[in-house]
Amino acid sequence: MPLAPHQFWQTVFPAGTFDAAPVDGFSDLYPALLPDGRQIALPVRVLPGDGSRAVASMIVNQASFAVEDALSDAMAAHARVYAPEIVIGVPTLGLPLANGVARRLGHERMVALGTSRKFWYSEELSEPMSSITSPQHAKRLYLDPRMLPLLEGRRVVVVDDVISSGTSMLAVLKLLEKANIRPVAAVFGMLQGDVWRQAIREFDAGFVSHVHGAVASPRLARTENGKWLPIQA
């Protein structure tokens, strides 16, 4: 049975519930695989343009706690390899996952970046940011200067919900560079396609191998039968 819109992101399905590689393509659902083989049903979203391209979407603040916990478990496992001392959360949807990862690592807190400028913030510790889902709504990303003592000289892992074009993560890296902070890794709820790799590579080629995701999804192209097949993009 097809899932209703409100049913996506709500259940962690057993491995093999959905066909992960249908020969004729996906319809409105893409099953993202957790490291243990369990599946999360993601809706296929058609990208703006001529309707020939799509992505599998994940909106963490609409997900069930069970799905959020499963993602946080997998993300914490990736992060733990780097022995981080502090987790940085990227707004907005990366913040609940950053909380979950930090708790699982035994941390007392995490550090949240912000997109709302408080009066004590400095423009020198800010960077413009946009995303594939909201390209028309460019924002500025801020690092609270009061948080610098928690970050300076420490092993930092960045946590966000999704990396797709790489522009948001690039803004994070540029912002942290202004504070002389180089993260040891970045961990995402989902790696969406591969376009992000080039954006990160151009900024810091060595950092690409330190980017990890709980699940991954491809970019999709419409087929003649109206369904969707993965593409390398």
Image (tube, rainbow, N blue to C red):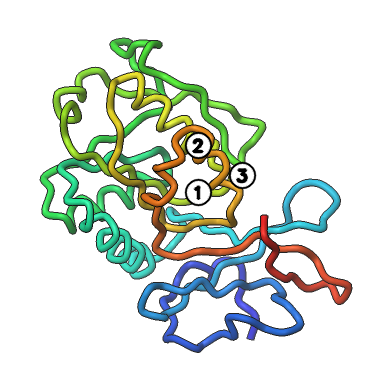
Residue 88 lies in what quarter of the image? top left
Q: Residue at image x 19%, y 46%?
A: 84
The reply to whether callout 1 and callout 2 are in contact (CB within 8 Å) is yes
Whole-angstrom CA distance, mark 3 to mark 2, is 11 Å
Q: Earlier in the sequence, mark 3 or mark 2?
A: 3
Amino acid marked by disc 1: Ile
Q: Which mark is residue 133?
A: 3
Q: Residue at image x 33%, y 11%?
A: 119
* Foreground pick, 5 / 85: 85
Q: Quadrant of the N terminus?
A: bottom right
Give the residue number, with chain letter if any, for mark 1. Answer: 163
Binning the other alpha carbons within 10 Å of mark 2 as few (below 14), some (14 to 19) or many (20 upward) gives many
Q: Quick one: SS at disc 3?
A: loop
x and y percent of residue 66 in the render? 34, 70
Q: Quadrant of the C terminus?
A: bottom right
Residue 179 lies in what quarter of the image? top left
x and y percent of residue 108 in the render? 11, 45
View extreme (right): residue: 224
Q: Residue at image x 17%, y 54%?
A: 103
